[in-house]
Amino acid sequence: MEITGNRRILTAREAGLVACRRCARVWPMGTTECGRCGARLQSRDTGSLGRVWALWIAGLICYIPANIYPMLVTQTLLDTSKSTIVGGAVDLLHHGAVGVAVIILVASVLIPMGKFLAIAYLALSVHRGSNLSSGRRHHVYEMVEFIGRWSMIDVFVVAILSSLVQLSVVASIHPGPAALTFALSVVCTMLSAQSFDSRMFWDEDAPQRKL
């Protein structure tokens, strides 16, 4: 239900249809179950914002210790060192690995913070409105969902290092407590974004059709 140029987009609800959020198939309004995938059909998930905020707060709570506690614990014969996410990136900068440090900072700090801000903005815009059009907000939402799939890079790196660098008593690398809380934070933000019913963006264009 698409419209180009300056014309308003016709939503499935306005067309008397209800879309399945799992497989995207549309059915006549009033249908309660998707005939293709069996998912429950609902024109708007009125409880989605509550789940979005609950998971968003849980993700934020987990993200704080992820930046305070060590992500990596490196043990050698003579020393044991612990590195936080930012501390590890700073160490890499001091050793001249600028590219790797930038990747870690972007993947572990900028992207997670951007996701928190984007999800909060989208959730607030449903109630308070926004200067961005419904289409642009939907694009932001799709971007958040896409990036969320790649947010586990740090955890994968830690897991790979931990499995590869195990030289008995000579040297070894172990994941720190921040690895677990960072992974939980990523999972919570992914679930928060997936809980969002993005169809609510379009209701501002047709408030008289809210059901």
Image: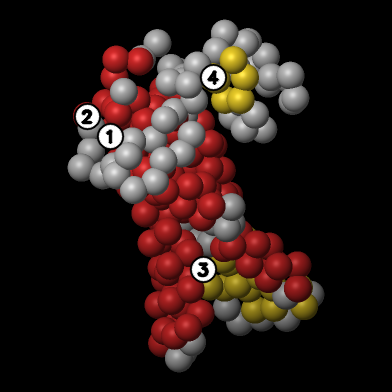
Foreground residue, 8 or 40? 8
Residue type, label 2: Arg
| For marks 3 and 1 on the same chain, the one whose residue lies earlier in the sequence | 3
Q: What residue is pinned by disc 1?
A: 125
Residue type, label 1: Ser
Of badges 2 and 4, nearer the viewer stands 4
Q: What residue is pinned by disc 3?
A: 82
| Relative to 93, residue 199 above or below | above
| For marks 1 and 4 on the same chain, the one whose residue lies earlier in the sequence | 4
Numbered circle sitting on residue 17: 4
The quadrant holding residue 208 is top left
Q: Secondary structure at mark 2?
A: helix
What residue sits 53% from the left and 62% below the top? Answer: 71
Q: CA distance from mark 1 to mark 4?
A: 24 Å
Q: What residue is pinned by disc 2?
A: 128
| Relative to 33, residue 183 above or below | below
> Dot 4, crowdedness within 10 Å: few (<14), some or many (≥20)?
some
Relative image position of residue 124 (x, y in whole percent): 28, 33
